[in-house]
Image: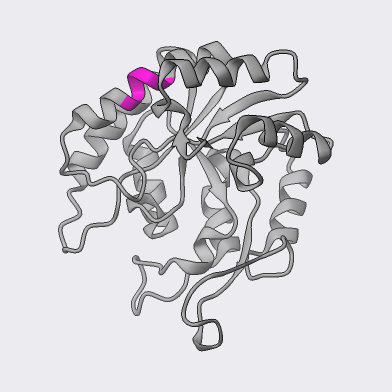
Amino acid sequence: MYLTGIADEASQDIEGQINATRELGWNAIESRFVNGKNLHDLDEESFESVCRAIDGSGVHINAFGSAIGNWGKDVRDDFSITQGEIDRAIPRMKRLGAKFIRIMSYKVLDQEDQLVEERVRRLRLIVESFLSENLIPVHENCMNYGGMSWRHTLDLVEAVPGMKLVFDTANPVFNRDRSKEGEPWQCPLEFYHKVRAHIAYVHVKDCLTPCAENGGKETYVYPGDGHGRVPEILRELKDSGYDGG
């Protein structure tokens, strides 16, 4: 097992991200934003600047936290948007030696028909694009179709050959289980137990369930201080022999 982090939460510029990672005694970054732009959306000059900063720093990029199919993207939008992100991400992942790329299954639509067939069609294209280049796409249980419940996630895993998961411990805390009557809050431990056979990567995060006391919004806290069942999940991961990030 190794530790890595989404370093733009410490600094927007790459130098600050590298320094924050070193201060923690880590040597890997899951790169999402640099100066406010996703790594696959930087212009060439800015991307090369990132590469120069990383080279020789003792820190490497182990994963891309891409915006592909994320909760801000609509499955009804032209696929060329997604294809462009894929086409830019692949050579940049290879340049930096990144192994994983976080993907999602597009935002939840405000309608009964969630256009599942189109989501699956797109995910198959996305996943195959990366697998064909020996890169590993991992779907996150965030505010997207697959994050609506562990059942939705497993439906996608079964429908999309080769797709693995990045499991976020906190996201179930503030997402409703759309597969259950009454749509209760999801249980992180239940979600983990149901999908663990497909997990290739883990986001350790914790928060408090939305309630009247916190204004009905998720409140992020240190791991172990919230409702994400983080200690139990990490203990089970370790006991299972998990050796990922």
Could you tell me residue 198's position as x and y percent? 53, 39
Apparent side of residue 43 relative to residue 120 in the rendered image (left or right): right
**Does the image show residue 245?**
no
* Magenta span contains residue 86: yes
* Magenta span contains residue 185: no
**Does the image show residue 145?**
yes
Quarter of the view holding residue 11: top right
Which residue appears at 54% of the width and 27% of the height? 100
Could you tell me residue 136's position as x and y percent? 50, 25
Considering depth in this image, is 103 or 66 the residue closer to the camera?
66
Could you tell me residue 160's position as x and y percent? 34, 33
Quarter of the view holding residue 182: bottom left
Apparent side of residue 237 relative to residue 22 in the rendered image (left or right): left
Apparent side of residue 202 relative to residue 145 in the rendered image (left or right): right
Considering depth in this image, is 236 or 5 the residue closer to the camera?
5
Apparent side of residue 103 relative to residue 114 in the rendered image (left or right): right
Q: Quadrant of the N terminus?
A: top right
How many numbered badges does the structure rendering display? 0
Considering depth in this image, is 212 or 17 the residue closer to the camera?
17
Above/below status of 4 relative to 229: above
Q: How is the image coloured?
A: one colour
Which residue appears at 43% of the width and 32% of the height? 163
Considering depth in this image, is 68 or 159 the residue closer to the camera?
68
Above/below status of 91 relative to 84: above
Above/below status of 192 relative to 41: below
Which residue appears at 71% of the width and 46% of the height? 237
Q: Quadrant of the C terminus?
A: top right
> What secondary structure do most residues of the magenta stretch adopt?
helix
The span picked out in magenta is 85-89
